Amino acid sequence: MTTDFLVGQIRKKESFLCIGLDTDLDKVPKHLLKEEDPIFAFNKAIIDATHHLCVAYKPNTAFYEAYGIKGWQALEKTINYLNINYPEIFTIADAKRGDIGNTSTRYAKAFFEDLGFDSVTIAPYMGRDSVEPFLAFKDKHTILLALTSNMGAFDFQTKMVDGKELYKQVLEISKTYENSENLMYVVGATKATFLTEIRNIIPNSFLLVPGVGVQGGSLAEVCRYGMSDNVGLLVNSSRGIIYASDQDNFAQASAEKAKELQQEMSLELKKR
């Protein structure tokens, strides 16, 4: 998917909502456990109820890998269902990969070619040759971890190295990578006040912003400091939407929560 197409969907839906499909069988409604594939049954219901309110879905692969081959099959069913029924949706494999070049190429093929995701999250710690294999794929996007929403982000990401915070060096150096126009970046909503300086370095890049909702991030602050001329934001909510209810009405409840965020986003877009 091209960036221009994604921006068009944001304008059309008046939404830059990304819904995280972090599906945990300990939290899904109990009646779904009787299904042949309860993970996919849950995901399908959430997708069908919320697709008109969001522009992206982000399965965290750990929630599928934890269930072995059945979990991986559920992930494959989920992405196939999205690509066939809602091809306008931007899909993110939240896999946090990153390894030496030939291994990264295989990871890229797995997520971009075999599964058909539009993007994948990547840890940049190993540098250029671990990232560029992902960037080589046309109309696919590599989402680098820059400044994450967890407390441990302060262990390394904000440390000064040669007079500059490490996360800023990640942003600046990554701009020199081949096909860097295919880069997006993860910046946590709980770090919203950092967004002004981040935008000084990458004024037009899309940011994937987790941490709104359960983690306490402010959508208004994210928009105030982080919105660009082309919007440039995908704001993720996972637990706050998909686990809005554990009863039979779980899909409807998820749609209501998604609608609340979409309406807030619509107002933010109209302000600008």
Image (cartoon, rainbow, N blue to C red):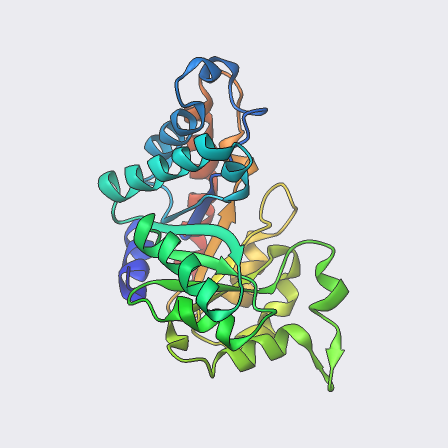
Residue 119 as seen in the image, left or right of residue 207 = left
In the picture, residue 215 is in which quadrant? top right
Vertical placement of residue 87 versus 206, above or below: above
- Towards the viewer: 23 or 114: 114
Q: Position of residue 88 (x, y in %)?
A: 26, 49
Q: Which residue is at 52% across, 15% downward? A: 30
Is any part of residue 127 visible from this angle? yes
**Spot occupied by residue 75 in the image (x, y as percentages of width and height):** 41, 38
Q: Quadrant of residue 138?
A: bottom left
Left or right, 60 with respect to 159, comes to left
> Where residue 206 appears, x then y in whole percent?
44, 65
Against 38, residue 122 (above or below) is: below
Q: How many marks?
A: 0
In the current view of this chain or complex, which residue is farthest to the bottom? 162
Residue at x-position 73% and y-position 86%? 162
Location of the N terminus by quadrant is bottom left
Closest to the observer: 92 or 217? 92
